[in-house]
Each structure stands twice: as structure tokens, then as C-alpha cells.
Image (cartoon, rainbow, N blue to C red):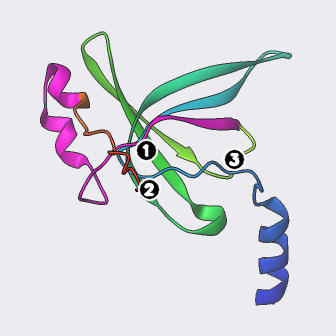
Amino acid sequence: MNQIIQKIEQEQLKKDVAKFNVGDSVRVHTVVKEGDKERVQIFSGIVIGRKGTSLNASFTVRRISYGEGVERVFPLHSPRVAKIEVETAGSVRRAKLNYLRTRKGKQAMAVREKALTAKA
């Protein structure tokens, strides 16, 4: 029985998932259905957490919109998520960035950019 479930899950996994981590600034392209029309809507922000594995994987993106914090949880392998673009890679020391929820203004989106190391 377990092998059957694993086979079905493997068929539903996306093959072209972008590599991103907690702290990265991302743009998530979501497919929105309105009546009989479909359009792509972009939600951009900082990834504050990831959870789950394989088909159950999801991630939370937070942004400040008109002075109000907005969070949205996206299933990683959902057909509604068209693509994920990484704008900037962030350098953080923890797995969940819940402390950003208490911050105000520019500090609420303050995550260090990952420093590129030059190889000699």
C-alpha cells in the first residue's frame, strides 16, 4: 500500500522547483482563476519559514503592504504556483524568522544579503 502512495506522490511532484531558503526575497507567481479567465498574480516578499517534505512541503512569504504586514502560505508543489523567482539570497541564522512579525517599518524587512565569496 505504501509503495502505491509513494508512486502517486512522485507523479504529482514538480520537477522544476526553484532552490530557495529562509531569508531569501522571492517573487511567487500564482495562477488566479476569476470566472472563466486565468491570470498570473505576483506576490513578492521574504520567506520566513518552510515546513513539510515532498508533496506536503510549504513555505510562508511575508511582505509589508501599505504599512500592514501580510503573510501568505504557499504549497510548494501546487499547480496554482506557476513559478518562484529568487530576487536576493538572504543570510540568516535560524530556520524560522518569526521575529520579523514584531518589527515595524524598514526593520520588518531587514535581512542581510548573502555575501558572495570570491575564490582566488
Residue 57, above or below 59: below
Tell me the residue at 63%/20% (across/down).
41
| 116 magenta-colored | no
Q: Is mark 2 in CB contact (under 8 Å) with mark 3?
A: no
Q: How many marks?
A: 3
Q: Residues within 10 Å of mark 1 (few under 14, many from 20)?
A: many
Q: Tell me how far mark 1 sits from mark 2, CA to CA.
A: 6 Å
| 90 magenta-colored | yes
Q: Which residues are magenta?
A: 81-108
- What amino acid type is highlighted by mark number 2? Arg
In depth, the one of 114 and 6 nearer the eye is 114
Question: In the displayed structure, does residue 118 sit left or right of residue 112?
Answer: right
- What amino acid type is highlighted by mark number 1? Thr
Q: Tell me how far mark 2 sits from mark 3, CA to CA.
A: 15 Å
The residue that disc 2 covers is: 50
- Point out the tag, 1 or 2, that comes first from the N-terminus: 2
Secondary structure, mark 3, is loop
Question: In the displayed structure, does residue 103 sit left or right of residue 3?
Answer: left
Residue 112, above or below 97: above
In the picture, the disc for residue 78 is 3
Q: Is mark 1 in CB contact (under 8 Å) with mark 2?
A: yes
- Point out the tag, 2 or 3, that comes first from the N-terminus: 2
Toward which corner of the image does residue 79 lie, by quadrant? top right
Tell me the residue at 19%/21% (across/down).
106
Residue 25, above or below 32: below
Toward which corner of the image does residue 102 lie, by quadrant? top left
The residue that disc 1 covers is: 60
In the picture, the disc for residue 109 is none
